[in-house]
Amino acid sequence: MMVADSIRPLLKESPEIVIPVIQAWITDQRRIEGPQLTIGDCLFHAVKCIYALSQLHLIDKQLVTEYTGGLGRLVLDLCPEDQRAQLRDNLANLGKQPQSLSRAPARVRRDVGHAREPASDDRARRQRRFSLLVDRLQQDSGAAIRTQEERSSAMASLRD
Amino acid sequence: MDNTNQNPPTDEILMGLAQLQRYLGDEMAP
């Protein structure tokens, strides 16, 4: 069953019922990423994930727009005061720019039958990891060379 | 619309919530 089929019935209910799910997700994300990940950004991201279902034409756009409007008001109440203005702006701009498929949530991309492409954040993280790996390999090979030089030098001193 | 507090959630709603949890769980942090 596609994710949209399961989520569609939720959109006929009060948005309040999804709040505990969103809160649990934010707690998990902040445990992984650390407190630099703001609650306001997480709240927006959760709303955006639901909104993406309409942008991919998986759920009726009007239904999702009305639902995310109500959900948006609820998440604004949950948002720390110093992040609220930013979240309000983000929510107001939701849907004004068409979301590209590669930026759509991963599970939705799988549902619509496209190969999973890493999101740009994901790609940046992979590149960073790759750079670290290359750096480490260079350091390791440098260490190996030094060790080899040291060995040769030690051998040479034994011969002398 | 706001009568969810009066009625226990149906299986369909519980399944939707579980699916939403997995859907968000698949997502990386913003």
Image: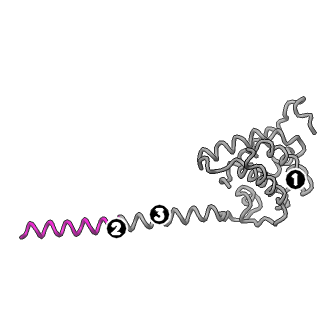
- As helix, strand or loop, the secondary structure at mark 3 comes to helix
- Amino acid type, residue under disc 3 in the picture: Leu
Residue under the point 59% across and 65% down: A124
Horizontally, residue A136 falls left or right of residue B16, namely left
Q: Residues within 10 Å of mark 1 (few under 14, many from 20)?
A: many
Q: CA distance from mark 3 to mark 2?
A: 14 Å
Q: Quadrant of residue A80?
A: top right
Q: Quadrant of residue A134?
A: bottom left
Q: Residues within 10 Å of mark 2 (few under 14, many from 20)?
A: few
Earlier sequence position, callout 1 versus callout 2: 1
Q: CA distance from mark 1 to mark 2?
A: 55 Å
- Amino acid type, residue under disc 1 in the picture: Val
- Residue A123 seen in the figure: yes
Residue under the point 92% across and 34% down: B3
- Amino acid type, residue under disc 2 in the picture: Ser
**The numbered mark 1 sits on a residue in which chain?**
A
- Which residue does the numbered mark 1 point to in the structure image? A64
Question: Looking at the image, is A130 positioned above or below residue B13?
Answer: below
- Which residue does the numbered mark 3 point to in the structure image? A132
**The numbered mark 2 sits on a residue in which chain?**
A
Q: CA distance from mark 1 to mark 3?
A: 42 Å
Residue B18: numbered disc? none
**Contact check, label 1 and label 2, Cβ < 8 Å:** no
Residue A98: x percent and y percent?
81, 66
**The numbered mark 3 sits on a residue in which chain?**
A
Residue A4 counted in the magenta span: no
Quadrant containing the C terminus of chain A in the rendered view? bottom left
User: Are both tags, 1 and 2, on one chain?
Assistant: yes
- Which residue does the numbered mark 2 point to in the structure image? A141
Main secondary structure found in the magenta portion: helix
- Residue B23 seen in the figure: no
- The span picked out in magenta is A140-160
